[in-house]
Amino acid sequence: MSAQAPKITLLAGGGGGAKLAIGLAAILQPGQLSIIGNVADDQEFHGLWVSPDIDTITYSLAGLIDRSKGWGLANETSRTLEGLARLGSDDWMYLGDQDFATHIYRTELRRQGVRPSAIAQTIARALGVTANILLPSDDRMQTEVKTARGWLSFQEYFVREQCRPEVLELRIQGLEEARPTEEALAAIRDADLLILAPSNPLVSIGPILALPAIRNALEKTRATRVAVSPLIGGQTVKGPANRMLKAAGYSCSNLGVADCYRGLIDSLVIDVSDSADVAALQARGLKTLVTQTLMSSDADKACLARELLAIAGLAGTGLASQLDQPERVSA
């Protein structure tokens, strides 16, 4: 393990992943943190390629996120979407005027043949993000949800249908052809601490782990491997993870989360409200940290990040001064 400036790699998607990314970035020095984001909820809208999870992480780290929504840009307007709706175009996927600029830029570069990984890094640098934003694959991968009405893209299910239909099955289109990026594999191989964010384990983290080479890299990494459960009190904070876990044959519990990550983690961090799960998790060979995992404030995010570093014995090794602030402050 590195004597100075240990390397931290976070696998993340959605709001929970973005919150933990903020906490880690607050206590780490520039360049220490690499984030492998989910690209399987990407979709084309109005002729533009939209990457919701990657943008949420990037905007969050840039301090530009709309905190009331947990996605999109703050102080946003929607004149372009309103104009498209007047012309008869679908407007169920909300894209703000500033956000359109990101998607226009991304799509232009993709059409020029620029690697999606390079595009993501260029956008992040332009917005002042110092963490390494990495894609698990430059190839097209898209999560689909089977309902009684047939297969829906993840965005159709999540946004247009607002998660209402029963989930019957999940699949990832393009998975067999997708190849991992060398940057993602290197970030896993070189990490001192590897964290699975408190994101939906099936549609946020799952598509990253579905790439065989990435899964193999996690199995072989020398890093301490820690997952943060997205459940609090046995329930999801928001989103359809509970129904998706059930549809995939897992229990909606910390044990179900542990089963999703079987063989890929050494420790599971759970909320204080779920302390009754400790014995069962330890019986499965997992170290367990019980703490407050709800990240209501920036102080909560940084405190949880510090506790994750402590699990790996990194609390105080070449990190930013915020590590010297031990108290968790609730919002």
Image (tube, rainbow, N blue to C red):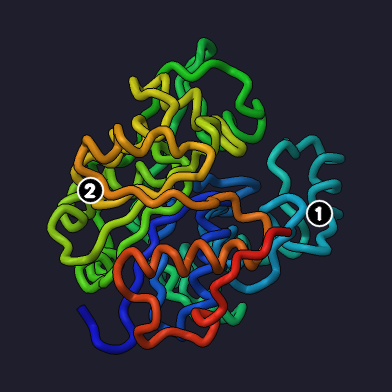
Element type at marker 1?
helix
* Residue type beneath disc 1: Thr
Q: Earlier in the sequence, mark 2 or mark 1?
A: 1
Q: Residue furthest top?
A: 148
Q: CA distance from mark 2 to mark 1?
A: 44 Å
Quarter in which the N terminus is drawn: bottom left
Q: Position of residue 157 (x, y in %)?
A: 57, 29
Q: Position of residue 118 (x, y in %)?
A: 41, 73
Q: Position of residue 181 (x, y in %)?
A: 27, 63
Q: Is residue 126 above or below residue 54?
A: below
Question: Mark 1 Cα within 10 Å, few/some/many (few <14, many 20+)?
Answer: some
Task: Say which of 80 and 278 sits in front.
Answer: 278
Task: Say which of 304 and 260 sits in front.
Answer: 304
Q: Residue furthest left?
A: 220
- Residue drawn at x 57%, y 59% as measured from the top left: 19
Give the side of residue 41 with respect to residue 311, left or right.
Answer: right
Task: Say which of 209 and 124 sits in front.
Answer: 209
* Residue 288 visible somewhere in the drawing: yes
- Residue drawn at x 23%, y 39% as measured from the top left: 262
Give the side of residue 171 with respect to residue 302, left or right.
Answer: left
* Residue type beneath disc 2: Leu
| Dot 2 and dot 1 residues touching (CB under 8 Å) | no
* Residue 113 visible somewhere in the drawing: no
Q: Position of residue 80 (x, y in %)?
A: 81, 54
Q: Is residue 16 above or below residue 182?
A: above
Element type at marker 2?
loop
> Label 1, on which residue?
80
> Label 2, on which residue?
264
Give the side of residue 32 with respect to residue 320, left or right.
Answer: left
